[in-house]
Image (cartoon, rainbow, N blue to C red):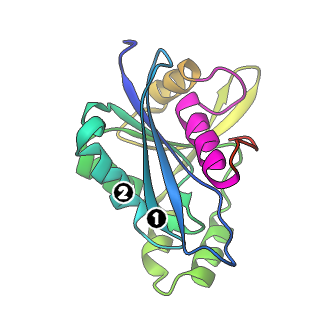
């Protein structure tokens, strides 16, 4: 695997549902050798469907054109702003790896979508077609992935190569830290 492979790591900034109607979607362009080449920030609606378009737009313009792979922290941003990984892959022709620490509870996600969306069916369809797989990494620890355009063995290699400490790959972890700093003035919490 070449060191100059570029990954777009995606996470959202924290928000307060009682006073925010938008939050930031933070995207970090990072090479496999951990060199950060760029940070991109876009506003997305809470409980909307614009996270998918924001990611695709970045991949088709400016520094996003050099990205080889997308890595997201789950598929929900800004509350229940569901990212359609199939659409990201189809529109960009870049593999997508969505990672989470815990196995997503699809039924709980569907209930949350029904509660927060005026048009829930699109989000429900995305959740139902997602395929969650468990990957063991490091010292008998596990992470859960949803993959598009990439085999699980290759995804495991990329995740292992992009982790420094903990479970989360650095492109996602850095985006998480930046999002936290945007909201609180300093980074806090773990990705």
Mark 2: few, some, or many residues within 10 Å (few <14, many ≥20)? some
In the figure, 99 relative to 67: above or below? below
- Based on the displayed image, in which of its 4 quarters is residue 160 positioned? top right
- Image quarter (top left, top right, bottom left or bottom right) of the C terminus: top right
Q: Kindly indicate whether the residue at mark 1 contacts the one at mark 2 (C-beta within 8 angstroms).
A: yes
Q: Earlier in the sequence, mark 2 or mark 1?
A: 1
Question: Left of 16 or right of it: where is 60?
Answer: left
Q: What x and y, as percent, mark residue 49?
A: 42, 70
Question: Left of 15 or right of it: where is 149?
Answer: left
Question: Left of 129 or right of it: where is 190?
Answer: right
Q: Which residue is mark 1?
A: 44
172 falls in the magenta region = yes
* Foreground residue among 79 and 144: 79
Tell me the magenta residue range: 163-184
Q: Residue at x 29, y 35 (%)?
A: 63
Q: Which residue is mark 2?
A: 54
Q: Residue at x 43, y 60 (%)?
A: 51
Total of numbered circles in the picture? 2
Q: What x and y, as percent, mark residue 57?
A: 28, 53
């Amino acid at each position: 695997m070449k060191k100059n492979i570029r990954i777009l790591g995606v996470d959202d900034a924290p928000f307060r549902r009682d006073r925010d109607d938008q939050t930031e979607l933070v995207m970090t362009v990072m090479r496999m050798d951990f060199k950060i080449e760029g940070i991109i920030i876009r506003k997305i609606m809470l409980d909307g469907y614009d996270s998918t378009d924001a990611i695709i737009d970045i991949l088709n313009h400016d520094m996003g054109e050099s990205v080889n792979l997308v890595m997201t922290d789950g598929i929900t941003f800004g509350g229940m702003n569901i990212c359609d990984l199939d659409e990201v892959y189809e529109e960009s022709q870049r593999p997508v790896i969505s990672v989470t620490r815990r196995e997503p509870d699809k039924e709980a996600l569907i209930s949350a979508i029904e509660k927060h969306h005026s048009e829930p069916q699109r989000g429900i369809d995305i959740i139902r077609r997602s395929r969650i797989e468990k990957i063991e990494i490091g010292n008998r620890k596990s992470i859960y992935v949803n993959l598009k355009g990439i085999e699980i063995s290759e995804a495991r290699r990329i995740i292992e190569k992009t982790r420094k400490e903990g479970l989360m790959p650095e492109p996602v972890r850095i985006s998480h830290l930046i999002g936290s700093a945007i909201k609180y003035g300093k980074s806090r919490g773990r990705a």
